[in-house]
Image (cartoon, rainbow, N blue to C red):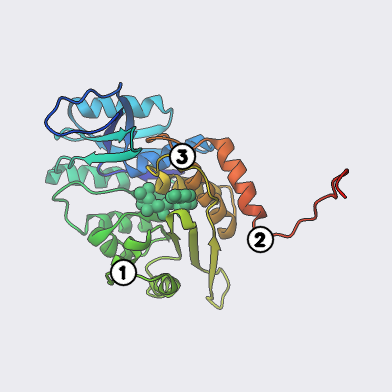
Amino acid sequence: MIITLTLNPSVDISTTIDHLVPEQKLRCAAARYDPGGGGINVSRAIHRLGGKSRAVFPVGGATGSLLEQLVAEQQIDFQTVPMAGWTRQSFVVTETSTRQQFRFGLPGPAWSMDERELFLNTVLTFPKPIDYVVISGSFPPGLPADYCAVIARIVRQRGARLILDTSGEPLRMAVQEGAFLLKPNLGELASLVGVDKLELDEVEEAARSVIQRGWCEVVVLSLGPAGALLVAKTGHADQRIERFRVPAPTVKKQSTVGAGDSMVGGMIYALSQGKSYEEMLRFGVACGTAATMNPGTELFHKDDVERLLNWINQSGKKVFLPVADGIN
Ligand SMILES: Nc1ncnc2c1ncn2[C@@H]1O[C@H](COP(=O)(O)OP(=O)(O)OP(=O)(O)O)[C@@H](O)[C@H]1O
Ligand SMILES: [Mg+2]
């Protein structure tokens, strides 16, 4: 069983316009509505690959009902936690003349004490057994920084593996409880180890220090178009640390929205299929990069993932080509 938690989900509205101008009335193209938020996207990615997960998220007000309907249309298993505040909305406008994307995110509703309790209880009472719990995305305003750590503790007590794709103080506090896998990008890893910026030759050491501090077993550092780096504890008794790097194939990029979530979804799916860390990383990069080939919040197509995975698996390998006829 894979559970994804989205604490600050949204209804994503996307549209296009030729170009943005201030003051004037802007006539946008027809809107597209998608369910949004890290965990929900991870669940969508897992579903698209043929796997199963349950997406757990709060909903409130009319926008909450809309979110529930949009998630139901995705045909993923989900469980909502009712809240008083209205579910937030995000607005993405793509300027067709420049292909620039403008992303407007609104804060979500704050949770009352009772609502915080209710959400924790939902995690506490998931039917057993749970294999993986993913916490992905931002947090509602006003939530105490240690809330994620409380969830991390419950997940550990329940014997599940925790995957964290979040940032800032909540992440710093949650890792004290010990996670299974972290998927930071460069900025998130820098902030986790307490520095302003990390140079490329410093990232491996930073990821290793995260593992040595006992914060997690696996770090997958995503590097956008440069692919990803995995640093992990080996299963051996000598507790060595292994490292593995996968380049991202070069593709025609449309939108990077959901690339990180697609990568996380792909990696959990691979793990649930009993794949090694190396295979997991290759698959994750293939899913992340495949997601950049589609506009808006569309995530990836499975056949693109297969093609890219093939390319990744071939890269760096020597192959012998047949000599073509008719060339002297
Ligand atoms: N421009 C790109 N070209 C090819 N692949 C990309 C590109 N951007 C992202 N990816 C793929 O997606 C993966 C995750 O992307 P990235 O490192 O940007 O994550 P992130 O910063 O967490 O993104 P997000 O904004 O979705 O949270 C990368 O490891 C890579 O495989
Ligand atoms: Mg991310």
Indicate if the residue with disc 1 has its beta carbon within 8 Å of ligand 1.
Answer: no
Q: Mark 1 points at which residue?
A: 197
> At 40% across and 46% down in the image, what residue appears?
261
> At 26% across and 64% down in the image, what residue appears?
173
Say which amino acid is labelled 3. Answer: Ala
Q: Residue furthest bottom?
A: 238
Say which amino acid is labelled 2. Answer: Gly
Q: Dividing the picture into quarters, in which one does residue 214 lie?
A: bottom left
Q: Mark 3 points at which residue?
A: 45
Position of residue 194 measured from the top left corner of the image (x, y, whole percent):
27, 71
Position of residue 244 measured from the top left corner of the image (x, y, whole percent):
55, 65
Disc with the residue nearer the chain's start (1 vs 3): 3
Horizontal placement of 285 versus 91: left or right? Answer: right
Disc with the residue nearer the chain's start (1 vs 2): 1
Horizontal placement of 95 versus 127: left or right? Answer: left
Question: Is residue 296 visible in this depiction of the protein?
Answer: yes
Say which amino acid is labelled 1. Answer: Lys
* Vertical order, 257 against 312 (above or below): above
**Closer to the camera in the image, 302 or 39:** 302
Mark 2 or 3, closer to the camera: 2
